[in-house]
Structure formats: structure tokens, C-alpha cells
Image: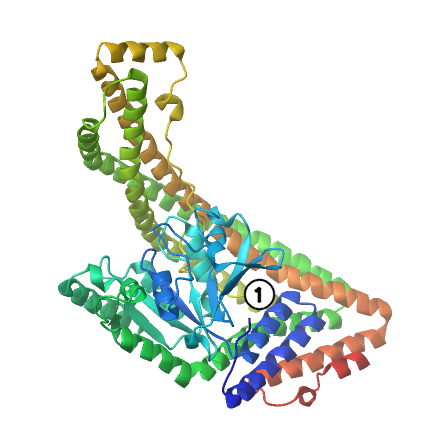
Amino acid sequence: MTTARTDRDDVVQDTQVEFPLLRLAELAEDLGSERVREEATALAQRANEGRFYVACLGQFKRGKSTLLNALLGDRILPTGVLPLTTVPTVVRLGASRGARVRFRAGKWMAISPEDLPQFVSEELNPENKKGVVGVEVFSPSPLLAQGMCLVDTPGLGSVFEGNTAATQAFVPHIDAAIVVVGADPPISGEEVALLKKVGKHVRDLLIVMNKADRTSIEERQAAKSFTAKMLGQHLQRRIGPIYEVSAEERLANCGPERDWGEFVAALEGLVHESGSELVRAAARRGLARLTEELFAIISEEREALIRPIEESEARIHHLRQTISEAERSLRDVSYLFLAEEHRLSDMFLAQRKQFLATAGPKVNAEFERELKTLPRHYGPKFRRDTFHLAQVVVEREIRPWLEAEQVAAEQEYRKVDSRFVSIGNDFLKNLAESGAPEFTRMPNPLDSNQGFRVRSRFTFEQLLHVALPSSPLRYLADVFLGMVRAYGVIEKEASDFLAHLMEMNSTRVQSDVVNRVQESRGQLEVEIRKLLHEVTRVAQRALDRARVAKAEGAAAVEGALARLGRAERALRALSQSGEGNRPFAEDGWSRESRRND
């Protein structure tokens, strides 16, 4: 199930793109960075096969999976009302339909496409408890014949925050994007924030307004104008046409075609005109990012070899002291964040009170209306039916409010988060300018667009111990009430139960949102600390390797310095070589030369 290429020139070009990445993988192996080696090797394989990723992005319930199925002409990707994608799903060319999943242990397991929901749905794999880290689907669609891979990404804005995080984490691997928007509701702030991040390195964005069959012409025109305006403002570039389609109609081969033909033609044009360049651009981005990491390792190891061991130990001690002082400063920032948490908590409390004031009468009216349809015969059964009805009516109102509250809360949290991420990045920048060279090699800055960093843990409390009391006296009393047709007593208790359900579950929603704010703040602080301690970790590893070399004598130290020099020259050549058409030996860093060291 591999991607077949039909253009001989493309094969040669993409093989040449592979060379610098393979050299980078060799360098990473020698420098002891297994993570960089694995990522460079995977990117080289992708370049050699000419694969590039066109990600389908958008908010939860935009119809992304349905749109991809329509492009493939096959309902191969699962769709549904509930969030369905816990990890990005890559659709590749295959001789026949197929699928496979990869787990945290690193092994792939072949599965039937019909079994995909077992691994990619929140219902059957809640919060990705099965540990799925990769999903690939194989399709014989001619659309994929030239190396394009379609990527079904988790929807933004669902109550499952891990889905949004999975999409954010995939952003560096995106080469082009299909952006699925809607008219009701129009493009959201979260979608705009993601596209702003994607747009920094992705040129080709195809904007699709799906579900055109469900909205009026006026609604679609207004939404298209709003979407174009928002994206133009935030991406600071011209936005191409917005294609109106109905993916469901195209799958069913019914209804007007609308802009479907133009959309497919634009996608095919992307493959023919930009496919090879997208592969090369992905390779260049990965090469630049991974090269910087190896430069930092080389610099640290060289300095550790040149300095006396005692001086390196003293520097690491100083680094740790500086980090301890930095963490004390972080606590001051944390107090500011804590004040914002209290403000948000008060706001969520006010919103819960407003929700109860607005939704309470509506819920009571619905309950009273549906209560009249229940048969009134056996007392205990009538109690079960009325209490179950109360649960259904309350959950029916609570769930949509939960989703709306989570989205609103995330927007409020992002405002606070962006300020504190900015403070955190300024904090790291000041450290880098403090005179300690180690901090100038700080890893990538914090992401200001991440939002909530933890998933929702909300579960609807049904209060079964109240709804289904086990007391024999209660059971006998209900039998008696049914016999004398005194159903009003049970109805009154069910009405009180309904009010209690509303109060308790709205409080649980509020608590869930507040907890997500608090835990997200804590994880933001952890992210900053991880960046700080990564500096010490690299320095400590360099010291350990230097200690071994010095114990073996001056010749070993000279050999290690020479090896680092060759690695640095090779890295510099890689960063300057563009697509790297030269053979391995020209940069002085082949496996043969490494064996001779």
C-alpha cells in the first residue's frame, strides 16, 4: 500500500530532496539525538515517495470527513454527529481500500476501514485511551495518484479539547489546506487563529463553504463576505474563491453541483502545478527546524570539550541557580494569572445564574408538556418514567449549553493566555539576553494560540440513587399512590428532582470550565519550566560526553572536536544547499568517514 508515482522527473526531483534529510539523520544519530534522527528519516521517506499533506481544517460539525469522502467517491472515513476524530487521519493511495493504526508502542496494526470508529471516535475511544498516535487509510482514488495525501483533522471547538490539541500539533506537517467553513455559524475566532498559524508557512488555502443545501442564498453570501473579510485581515493576503458545495449531495449524487467542479479542478491544479514544490517546501521547513536543534547540540558539546570539567560543572550549577531564580519570578506572574482566574470564575458564575434564569422556565414547560403524554398506571413505573423524563429534558438543555459555554470560556481564556504567553516569551527572551550563552539557544517559543491545554471532564450527573430509590417503603408507597391515582405526589417530586438536576449539572459545567482554566494555567507554567530545564539537560549531556572523552586522553578530545567540526560543516552545507543535489561525500560527512574516526 504505497504511493505510486507516474512522473519520472518528479521521482528524480523528490529523491534529490531526500538527500539532505538523510544526511541530517546520520548527523543526529552521531550526536545522540534519536528524536531528530527519527523525524528526519520519516521526512526523507515522505519526500522520496513524493507525498505531501493537504489537511482538511475546520470547526466541529463542518462536515470535513463527509467532504473528503465525496472527493474519494467512497464513504471510507467515518462520519457522525458526535466528535469522530481523536488524531489526524492520513488518506494515502493504495491498490485497494484499507486502513492501519499505530499505537504509542510504535507498531502498526492493519484494520478494516469499517473498524475505524473503534480507534478514531470519542464514543468508542474516549480521550484516546487506546493510545492511538497515527491512523492511515488507503484508497485507490485517482485523486491521490500523484502523491497527494488528504488529512482528516480533529474538529476545533468540540468539548473534547484533546481534538483541538491534536490538530494544533499537526500544523508543522501541513503543506496545503482545505478550509471547511459554514454559513450557520460562520467562521469562528478559533478557526481564524488556527489558519493564521497555518498561513505562516502554507501558501495554498482552498476555502470551501459546505452544507450549502441547508442555508439560503442570502445566508451564504453574508457568510462568504464575512469569511473573506476575516481571513484577509488576519492572514494579510488575498483570499481566493470560496467554493459553495454540499458534500452530502455529491456523495449521494443528487442535487445541484454548485461549485463542486471548480473546487475539484482547483485541487487537481494544486497537485499538477504545486505538488513537487510542496514536497520540497516541507523538506526545507523540516530541514531548517531540525538543523537548528543540532547546531545547538554541537555548540554545547564543543564548549564542554574545550572548558575544564570544573568550569562546566560550575556553569551548570550557575544555570540551575538562574533557573531557580527564574522560577521564583514565574511565581509572580502566576499570582497575576491567579487574579485573572478569579475574574473568569466570577464571570462563569454569573453566566450560570443567567442560564438558570433563562433555561429554567423553558425546561419546566417542556417537562410539563411531555409529562402529560406519559401513561399513568402502575405507580413505581410512573415514578421511573417521570424521573427518567426529567433526566432527558435537563440533559437535552445542559449539553448544548455546555458546548456554548466551553467555546465562550475558551475565547475568554485565550485573551488571558495570550497575555501571559507573551509575558512568558518576554521572560525567556530576557534570559537569552542575560549573558549566559546557553539561553541564547533556547528551544522554540511558547505557542500563543493553543488555548485550553486540558480536556473537558464533564459528565452528566443523573442522580440514579434519587431517581431509582431502593427503599421498599418507597416502592410500596408508589404502589398505593398508583392505586388511588394520586399521581400528583410523584409529579411534584419529579419536578423537584428536575430542578435539582438543573442546579447540580449547571454547577458541574461551571466547575469543569473553571478547572480547565486552572489546569491550563498550570500546564502553561510547566511548558515554560520545560523550556528552561531543556537548556540544562543539553548542557549536562554535553558535560557527560566531554567527561568520557577527557578520561580517554587528549587524542580522544581532539578526535571529538574534529568530529564536531565536520558535523558543523555538514550542517552548514545542508542549510545552504537548498535541495541538496550533491552526493554524501562532498560535505565530508559520509558513513565511511565516520567509521574512520
Viewport quadrant of the N terminus: bottom right
> What residue is rendered at 52% in x and 76% in y?
3
Q: Name which quarter of the figure residue 350 lies in.
A: top left
**Viewer-proximal residue among 374 and 43:** 374
Residue topped by disc 1 = 439
Could you say where residue 384 lies in the image, as x and y percent from the top left? 32, 23
> What residue is rendered at 56% in x and 88% in y?
12
> What residue is rendered at 46% in x and 67% in y?
91
Q: Is residue 105 left or right of residue 336?
A: right
Could you say where residue 386 lies in the image, as x and y percent from the top left? 27, 25
Position of 22 relative to 547 (above/below): below
The reply to whether residue 578 is visible in this rendering is no
Going by the numbered disc 1, the residue's amino acid type is: Phe
**Looking at the image, what colour scheme do you see?**
rainbow
Could you say where residue 238 lies in the image, as x and y percent from the top left? 28, 78
Viewport quadrant of the C terminus: bottom right
The reply to whether residue 30 is visible in this rendering is yes
**Viewer-proximal residue among 15 and 597:** 15
**Viewer-proximal residue among 341 and 469:** 469
Q: Secondary structure at mark 1?
A: helix
Position of 361 relative to 196 (above/below): above
Q: Residue furthest left?
A: 218
Q: Is residue 465 left or right of residue 432?
A: left
Q: In the rendered picture of this protein, how many numbered marks are placed on residues?
A: 1
Other residues around mark 1 within 10 Å, as few (<14) / some (14–19) / many (≥20): many
Could you say where residue 354 lies in the image, as x and y percent from the top left? 22, 37
